[in-house]
Image (spheres, rainbow, N blue to C red):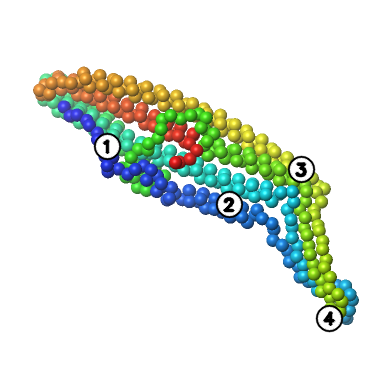
Amino acid sequence: MLSFVFVPLLCFSAEFNDVFYKALELSPMLKAKEQSILASRQNTLGEATYKNPILSIGLNDMLLNDNFLRRDVESMQTQFIGITQEFETFGKLDLKEAILRADTLILEYELEDLRLELYKKMALKVEEISTSNTLLELLEQKKSNLSLLLKYSEQSINIAEIFKVSVELQKKIFVVEDKILEIKEKLESYKNEFKYLSNQDYMLVERAKIEDDFLEGDIKKSPKYKIYEIKAKQLELTSRLEERKKYSNVNVGLVYNHRQNYEDYLSVSASFALPIYGSEEAKVQKTRHLSSENTQKEQSYISNAMAVFDTNDKRVEYLKRRVKNLDDILYKYKELNRYDKSNITNSVTLEKNIENENLLLDLEIEKLKYNLDMKSALLELFYLTSGSLK
């Protein structure tokens, strides 16, 4: 009887982290997000500063009669140059800078969330590809066993039973062949999805190593939750800024006036807006509504994330028990399946042995599916509770 032993070719496989970090470098989406972060930082430098001063140059009291070209006929005719600077008051500039830095921080957490999501998806594809390859080997072994049984059955059973047995065995072989074709199609699809995610052709990749112990409280460490926290602080700062906009900025101007035949002189002025129409208060109220909306979204995210965490956590525990039970059953069946190889030419013994071995193969296939489901649940827990990739 043919035995099935699968040896992982780890020495010829690539480290998952190496492939993943290369995918980070090649991802157009991540590159675009990195550029948006750089642009946000430059925007902070450009916006969180005083406005440029305004330079004024001109003539005063130009005559519109016959004396148009005659300057300094009157003492008020001057040539002047002046500068005006707007000064932010009551710490508005510092608040504006803090708001802009929060924009950058949100983008950085969005980038980290994209990385975590990519890690989860790539790791799952590697699991699916590895599982599919092993599954194909098991199914090919099962098909080989059935073909061997068909061959010996046709030689050993009386003519009256040959046709019936052959048809039944061929039907079983067809079922296995259909499953093999289905798995091969899925395998190609998984490899294409892996290429789409990583921008790399699939090679033999080691499975990602992640822990299997996650805490529900760590959900608040995730980038998605941090974005809500930062957004709440940013809206609070925005509200304070709008409140302080009730107190106008001050424009200070200094003008040097030159007069031929007369003494030069300086003009100094200060101007500021009068907040009499209440637009600032309307903006404060708008910001408060946005803050309330953000709080509701934050609470909704936490509720949904905790529900997903609870579902996957329970699923992991269930699947661990199922895999352990399968291991126990496999061990017992393997012990019962120790047979005398000298009986291999006996069709009855052969039929029983192949039936036992295919049962073992079916149990191995079931175990593969449970392990894949468990890894998928673990990766979801990893994504929900990880603050960053270490």
Picture quadrant of residue 7:
top left
- Type of residue at label 3? Glu
Q: Do the residues labelled 1 and 4 touch (CB within 8 Å)?
A: no
Q: Nearer the viewer, mark 2 or mark 3?
A: 2
> Looking at the picture, how far across and down is residue 270, in whole percent?
81, 58
- The mark nearer the N terminus, 1 or 2, is 1
The percent coordinates of residue 2 (x first, y second) are 17, 29
Q: Name the residue under label 2.
A: 40
Instruction: Say whether residue 120 is visible.
Output: yes
**Mark 4, residue position:** 69
Quote the CA–CA distance across marks 2 and 3. Answer: 28 Å
Vertical relation: 173 (above or below) 332: below
User: How many residues crowd mark 4 within 10 Å: few (<14), some (14–19), many (20+)?
Assistant: few
**Residue 18: quadrant of the picture:** top left
Q: In terms of sequence position, does the residue under pointer 4 or pointer 2 come before the other? A: 2
Label 1: element kind? loop
> Dot 2: few (<14), some (14–19), or many (≥20) neighbours within 10 Å?
some
Contact? badges 4 and 2 (CB < 8 Å): no
Which residue position holds label 3? Answer: 281
Secondary structure of the residue carrying numbered label 4: loop
Q: Which of marks 4 and 2 is in front?
A: 2
Residue located at (80% from left, 69% from top): 256
Report the amino acid beneath label 2.
Ser
